[in-house]
Structures are given as structure tokens and as C-alpha cells.
Image (cartoon, rainbow, N blue to C red):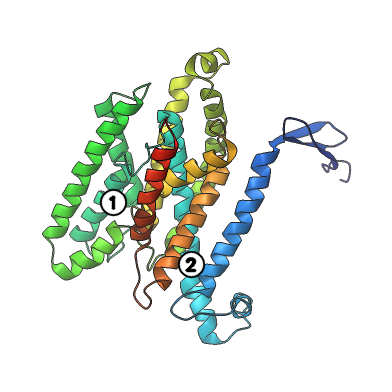
Amino acid sequence: MAQSMIKLASIKHNTDNALVIRLNNGNYSLLFNQQIVLLSVVLMVLLACAMLGSLVLGTTTLSIQTVFDALLGQASQSQQLLVNEFRLPRVIAGLVAGFALAIAGSLIQHVVRNRLATPDVLGINEGAALLMLIVLVSSNAGLMGPWWVAPVGAFTSGILLLIIAKGLGTRGYRVILIGLALAYLVRSISELMLAHINSLHASATYNWTVGNLNGRGYEVAEPVALILMALMPFLLFTSRQLRVFQLGEELASTLGTHITRIQFMAICLAIIFAGLAVGIGGPIGFVAIAAPVIINKILGSNQLAIINTGLLGGILVVVADTLGRVLVAPLEIPVGVLTSILGGPFLLWVLLNNKNA
């Protein structure tokens, strides 16, 4: 039994910033980019701080000690109810939504090779939101509706985009322009539907269509998180192939990468991830563009740190949702509105600081 266990032999780093972990006397080796590993640690610490801050802050501000007591079941009943039944499920939902959105944005940006290409810009998020809206106004599903409708809407919108654009290939700008037109068309249909339902229902539904985590919790975060975990092997494989794709199509083909297949896998994963995110909190804007751009700025444009991008997306959504709850308390600013407000200046920064953007 002891002989079958894998033992750590050594951990070293070389001049190429590669972290090499050797196991079982060097019989097995794992190679990591040291910079990416270090960034992962930093992002996980920041994510933990963002989640703790979200549990502490709100209409009723709690101390850090009270939050930990509530998590351990040692605080008062009302404090445990506030932390465990209201704030923590919402934080988890925001984390999962941000993680999925950021990864979807990163995949599409690398496939289309343009930083402006994200699920919300290409109309994929709007397609998911439109189908959710149709279900909301045509059934008794309540103000939220079934989360699984959104991936179906995202998939439909994505397929429509690919058909009109006649695939991806090297037509990055063509895809973006058609996606923009599709996004405006779908968004106008959504607004037309909102204009023809009663004002009370329209007001409540509108809050969801701009991105809102109010009322969301484990009932949507858990199934979405399980699906994301199931898709993780496919995601890691695709991201590894996309790194080769960054070297250029000719060189990637020479190295054995099937360009069309990898593009198809990446865009399918991006559509699914974007749809799942919209199913949780609606079309939360600018996270899909901001997270990959910031990670690329830190690591360099040739790096594709897909997990780090997802972690940063989770941080952005959790922080934005927290700010939305405390800035005008006891009222709330939907998380999608806040990310859009912050996203405008960010987009200008991207365009003005990169000649290739």
C-alpha cells in the first residue's frame, strides 16, 4: 500500500520560470508556469477577501468574528440566518456566474483573436436572456424562471451567429460586426416584450435582464457548478490547444493541432459557459471582456491562463454585487448595472492603451 502511494521527490524552478514538481523519485514530473501559479495564489487570496467582505457588508454590517461564528453555527439565530441563508448563497452564485462568464470571454477572444469579442458583444448573452424572458412572461415560473433555459438560448443565438457569419476562420471582424447587429436585434426584441407586459411584472423582470443576483443562491449555483466541473477536462484540453493556436494557424497545423476542431470546441464551450452564467444572474456585462484583458496585461498577451481568468471573473462579480448592495443601501444597484458603469471607462482604457485593440 505504501509503495503504491505517489511521493513528492522535489520541487524546482528553472530559468524559464517553469516550476517542476517531480514525484516518485523522478518517475513522474509536473510542469507549471511559475508566474501563473503565483498569480493563482494571489487571486485565490483576493477571492477569499472579496467573499469575506461580501459576507460582512450589507444593510446590516457584521464583524469578521461574527461571520466566522455564524459559519461555524456559534452566532445568534438571526446572524446565522443572514450569513448562511441569504449572503453566502448569493456570494457563491456570483462567484460561479463570474467564473463562467470570464472563461467564456477568454475562449471567444482567443478564437476570434480580438479583445472586443465577448458573449455579450456577440449577442450570445442576449439570446440566453431573451429565451429566459420568453419563459418568464409566458409561464408561471416566477420572476427568475428555470436556469437551464439560458444555455439553450445562448446555444441558439451562437448557432445563428455562426450561420450568418459563415463560421469563424480568420473573419474576426466579420464575426464581431454580425454579433453586434445580432445583439442589438435580440435586445430590441427583449425590450419590445417588456413594453407589452404589465408595468409591475416588467419592472421586476427588467432588473433581471440587466444582471441581478438578488434571490439567487444554491438552487442555481450548485447544478451550474457541477456542470462546470464536468466540463473542466474539456476546457483544460481546449485551452492547451489554444495556446498552440496562438503561434499561428500554419505553425499550429504543423504541430498537429486541428484548427477547425479546436475552434469549434472552444466556441461551444464558450456558449455553454456564457449560457450557464446568464442562467444564474442574467446578462452581467463587461466581466467577459475585463477579466481576460486584465490577465493578459499581467501575464503577457501570449499566455492563456484560463483558470486564473475565471477566478478574476468571480472576484469582479462578487465585488460588484457587494458594492451594489452597500452604495445606496437599503436599496440595491443590480450587479449588471454596476459592472456596466465600471466597464465603460475600462473599455476606453483598453482601446486607448493598445494600438492593436
Res 273 visible: no
**Is residue 204 depicted above or below 170 in this figure?**
below
* Residue marked by disc 2: 89
The numbered mark, 1 or 2, whose residue comes first in the sequence reads: 2
Q: Position of residue 79 (x, y in %)?
A: 53, 83
Query: Which residue does the image show at 43% across and 66% down from the upper left?
Result: 323
Q: Secondary structure at mark 2?
A: helix
Residue 4 x/y as whole percent? 84, 41
The three-letter code of the residue at mark 2 reads: Pro
Mark 1 falls on what kind of element?
A: helix
Tell me how far mark 1 sits from mark 2, CA to CA.
22 Å
In-image side of 244 versus 123 (left or right): right
In the displayed structure image, the side of residue 87 where residue 209 appears, left or right: left
Q: Residue at x 31, y 38 (%)?
A: 122
Q: Quadrant of the C terminus?
A: top left
Residue 15 drawn above or below residue 95: above
Residue under pointer 1: 129
Decide if residue 332 is in sight here.
Answer: yes
Q: Residues within 10 Å of mark 2 (few under 14, many from 20)?
A: many
Q: Residue at x 49, y 51 (%)?
A: 313
Rendered view: 16 above or below 43 = above
